[in-house]
Amino acid sequence: MKTLLTTTLLLGALAASSAMAAPDKGEKVYSTTCVACHGGGLMGAPKFGDKASWAPRVARGKDALYASALNGVRMMPARGGNMMLKDAELKAAVDYMLSKVH
């Protein structure tokens, strides 16, 4: 019985931490990969938090932004140059950046 209770508590804690980790994942990917260009607007990248530079991109829709991040666009390489990123991680980073311009 004690083992069952411990397992249940651990699973509950894991589920809660997973739900809370999603926004943190986007911020972490941004801080370790995306900031290199989006932090200062290098090579035409829309600057983090700059509503005006993001507006035309936001107007194209989130799916178009995901596609640009996954496949690359203009000077931006696919996956921001970090080929180790999973699709979900990259999308979380896009969501994080968008959350700062809405």
Image: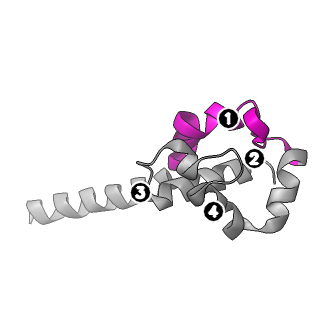
Marks 1 and 2, the one that precedes in the sequence:
1
Marks 3 and 2, the one that precedes in the sequence:
3
- Residue at mark 3: 18
Instruction: Look at discs 2 and 4 and give the one toward the viewer.
Output: 4
Instruction: Look at discs 3 and 2 and give the one toward the viewer.
Output: 2
- Residue at mark 4: 66
Q: Quadrant of the N terminus?
A: bottom left
- Residue 33 location, quadrant: top right
Q: Are marks 3 and 2 in contact (CB under 8 Å)?
A: no
Q: Are marks 1 and 2 in contact (CB under 8 Å)?
A: no
Residue drawn at x 56%, y 52% as measured from the top left: 78
Q: Secondary structure at mark 2?
A: loop
Marks 1 and 3, the one that precedes in the sequence:
3
Instruction: Look at discs 1 and 3 and give the one toward the viewer.
Output: 1
Tell which of 79 and 92 is nearer to you: 79
Tell which of 29 and 25 is nearer to you: 29
Q: Are marks 1 and 4 in contact (CB under 8 Å)?
A: no
Q: Secondary structure at mark 3?
A: helix
Q: Secondary structure at mark 1?
A: helix
Residue 50 among magenta residues: yes
Residue sitting farthest toward the front:
74
**Residue span colored magenta:** 24-51
Residue drawn at x 72%, y 52% as measured from the top left: 99
- Residue at mark 1: 37
Q: Mark 3, residues whose alpha carbon is within 10 Å: few (<14), some, or many (≥20)?
A: few
* Helix, strand or loop for the magenta stretch, by majority: helix
**CA–CA distance in space, label 4 to label 3:** 22 Å
Asked whether, in this view, residue 24 is left or right of residue 55, the answer is: left
Tell which of 89 and 74 is nearer to you: 74
Q: Secondary structure at mark 4?
A: helix
- Residue at mark 2: 100
